[in-house]
Amino acid sequence: MGPPSSSGFYVSRAVALLLAALAAALLLALAVLAALYGRCARVQPSDLHHSGVPDAASSPRGTQEEQLPTWPPRPTREPAGTATPGHWRPPGPWDQLRLPPWLVPLHYELELWPRLRPNEFQSPTLSFTGRVNITVRCTAATARLLLHSLFLDCESAEVRGPLSSGPRDGAVGRVPVDDVWFAFDMQYMVLELGATLQPGSRYELQLSFSGLVYRDLREGLFFSIYTDQGERRALLASQMEPTFARSVFPCFDEPALKATFNITIIHHPSYGALSNMPKLGQSEKRDVNGSVWTVTTFSTTPHMPTYLVALAICDYDHVSRTERGQEIRIWARKDAIANGNAAFALNITGPIFSFLEDLFNISYPLPKTDIIALPTFDNSAMENWGLLIFDESLLLMQPNDQVTDKKAVISFILSHEIGHQWFGNLVTMNWWNDIWLKEGFASYFEFGVINYFNPKFRRNEVFFSNILHHVLSEDHALVSRAVSLKVENFTETSEINELFDLFTYNKGASLARMLSSFLNENVFISALKSYLKTFSYSNAEQDDLWRHFQMVVDDQSKILLPAPVKSIMDRWTHQSGFPVITLNVSTGAMKQEPFYLGKVKNQTLLTHNDTWIVPILWIKNGITQSLVWLDKSSKIFPEMQVSDSDHDWVILNLNMTGYYRVNYDNVGWKKLKQQLEKDPKAIPVIHRLQMIDDAFSLSKNNYVEIETALDLTKYLAEEDEIIVWYAVLVNLVTKDLVFDVNNYDMYPLLKKYLLKRLISIWNMYSTVIRENVAALQDDYLALVALEKLFETACWLGLEDCLQLSRELFKHWTNHPGNEIPYPIKSVVLCYGVAFGSDEEWDFLLNMYSNKTKEEERIQLTYAMSCSKDPWILHRYLEYAVTAAPFTFNETNIMEVVAESEVGRYIVKDFLINNWQAVSERYGTQSLVNLMYIIGRTISTDLQITELQQFFGNMLEEHQKLTVRAKLQTIKNKNVENKKRNARMTAWLRKNT
Ligand SMILES: [Zn+2]
């Protein structure tokens, strides 16, 4: 799957929360329904009719009868006793998360018939029916079959066999099915048989079933409504990963249970159907009403897991090209294809495939690739073998994507999903505990691919900004999780979903990168080639990967490791957090300790006793030195000594390829500071970035003094790399600092200190914005970093920044068709409103009501909160809560206004007078969020009591209980921040 949206590019928190709430509500509804209704008829042997499904190998394949399920799902045909989840069952294999190993699936004949018809999609659900014949091999005698099934109604179940190994004949026996019931907790369908299946024999399970397709619920089959060529249309698609295949067809839904699939899709003739493999044939059938449906069959897939099964039914156009004889088609709305929006993706897809084929020396095994852009796919992408599914915002270029990072985003995500064709599809993890084996490597190779096509691409800096920065700021020894988990730690299916997070993707990619840095690219790729080749069409676990690395390492003599690859790497993947490496440059003594959030004295000794084997690549005076290893808690490296009197300097962690932070003694930091002031360019950009980010993070968590970090910023007047500025500003001008109104002391000092240094980089970029904004298009790091620079310059009151904002805003209000350059649009809108009157505000409101893109609407709702007129903000709140000419569904306006400079004063009063309406509009949970926002400035017990009383009137009993504790936590944090701010203020006073 694509990276999680928290590190993603366009998804807003509000959208994510809204979707999560929607999904939760639907799941709850489904769970209630499942509890109310049994899901499968009790199947008596005498009830079983021959369903007419011919043998798996015969052709053409038969098709099922029209049997529409009703909504709500009908009760079972038989008394529900045997099927209801509430019916007591003795403990058994159905209580386990993992399937019992009695049966191995070999082949699926799968037929799906979703009832999607043009112009009939008003309801939030559609029904579908399906049939599946699964050929299995029995490995242990059993009279009971378990397979996964969730929210499916079972229409019939038969077991045939044992199958002869020769050509099929009609004389295959039948195993009686006495009962079929569902174990809801672990999502199993259980078949109780009247006879025992024999080990070594093959059988065929024949099941027909029905279920529901939900609108926009990205789990299993779902449908979406969208607009194309001026009319509303519908499409249907699938998302099986990780465990939703079981809600589409009964199956053995574990990644190691690979099989081949023959897929048949029955669909309305006005739609086309796509699946993993090329179309094999097409025929027609009539339903009971006489309507004609199209039956599309597809070629047999390679051996693959259920989570890669994919299909789409839609009325789309496509563009195509051929790469090394393989057809690549990109499918999208007809408008988008006609406008050429898919051209960019089409042009790069083939070359990415070829690059990876050559790199791994393994050809892409499928005869075709389809990539389909869905209007709504949760801002994500999925790597289904042969049918990649993307959210269209991650695949198509829009005309207003000029001067955005859209091309880079599309390149990254495409590379990621294509990388999965090897990491994941060809070689699959044995189980979900090791998904970093596919997500980590697919994420890592995004950078290799893009670097290959664009050699000027700043690989290290972009890796830091896209991957490393996020995960290092979240990962720590106590709370975060390890990359690779123990299999036995999983007990519930829901835990599998939670694995698609920052640690799997970002830390996985970072560890892959570290591995490649201490081996070298050749050894690294050789080991991966050997691993991919060995486990093609099969499964692997982390130890298999390490074994192949070890084989390649043992085969050469250049690289010597201090321990086996497994010993080195297991500590990084099995332990949470990362080490802080401290070098004393006076003695050459180096030590490691785990990184803790807000370290307290002696924490290390109490809670963590395992060390990492740390590769230390390092530079001295700009020259790369040979690799050393810190393989215990401390060690002396005489070659790293630098005396206070000489001009040498040392930096550990070359190119930030190691997954750790670096600290120095006072002399070490002082040397670096002196070098920055003397000649910053002697230190590579990535290390200027590293020093700033490490020093601020370490100071925030009590590893170094804040003054050490601040000292590193004195040279900044000479800094012309915007990404380094970005690192400074996100660490220095934090949201908390901006919000802290009691910080009157610091603001003028910070203003003076920063503006003096910021002016040269400001001039550089303001000139680009004024004279040739299109030049930004090719400067990815500027696109990432410009907003923070612009926002800070205006916040500090830099007249030229305010002037430029006014100019751009005015130009835009006069010519709304001319977009404000995307990277600074939010800031310009905000200052336009802040300096404007109700006229400007109303203009934005009008724009808001005309925009359909959620992202743009969210941007406008934030900008409207920037007004400095209390009455305008008050009216905004009234619009949102009481009077409502607009619904403002994308964001919680109370929270948006409470976050703003003037709004925070308005919101409290508004709440007192309107709390009933506010809680009705946004729920009482929103009041808890508001408490955090409004509480951001409290620092005394009196303020706590005041706020507690204030919220006490509005919150529910159970919420009141925790209010004081929450406010106390906020206060403690604020008090800490204040101490830190006081020290920063003192430092600024001395250095301004
Ligand atoms: Zn992925």
Image: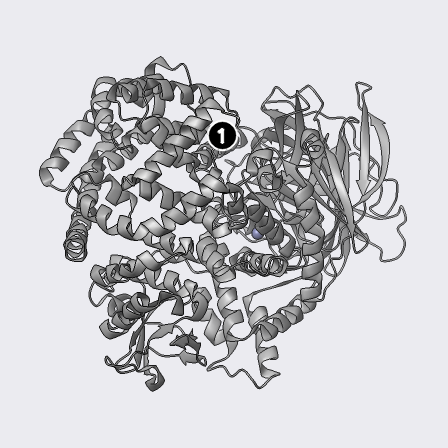
Q: Is residue 688 left or right of residue 981?
A: right
Q: In the rendered view, tell whether residue 714 sits above or below residue 883.
A: below
Q: Nearer the viewer, residue 199 or 392?
A: 392
Q: Which residue is mark 1?
A: 854
Q: Where does residue 679 sit, x and y in percent of width and height?
A: 34, 68
Q: Where does residue 210 sit, x and y in percent of width and height?
A: 67, 32
- Amino acid under label 1? Glu
Q: Where does residue 808 sit, x and y in percent of width and height?
A: 42, 32
Ligand 1 is within 8 Å of the C-beta of the residue at disc 1: no
Q: Where does residue 899 sit, x and y in percent of width and height?
A: 29, 34
Could one spot residue 4 in this view of the protein? yes
Q: Nearer the viewer, residue 768 or 964?
A: 768
Q: Is residue 890 left or right of residue 78?
A: left
Q: In the rendered view, tell whether residue 407 sits above or below residue 549.
A: above
Q: Is residue 353 left or right of residue 814?
A: right
Tell me which residue sits at (39%, 79%) in the image.
631
- Binning the other alpha carbons within 10 Å of mark 1 as few (below 14), some (14 to 19) or many (20 upward) gives some
Q: In the rendered view, tell whether residue 967 sits above or below residue 757.
A: above
Could one spot residue 1 in this view of the protein? no
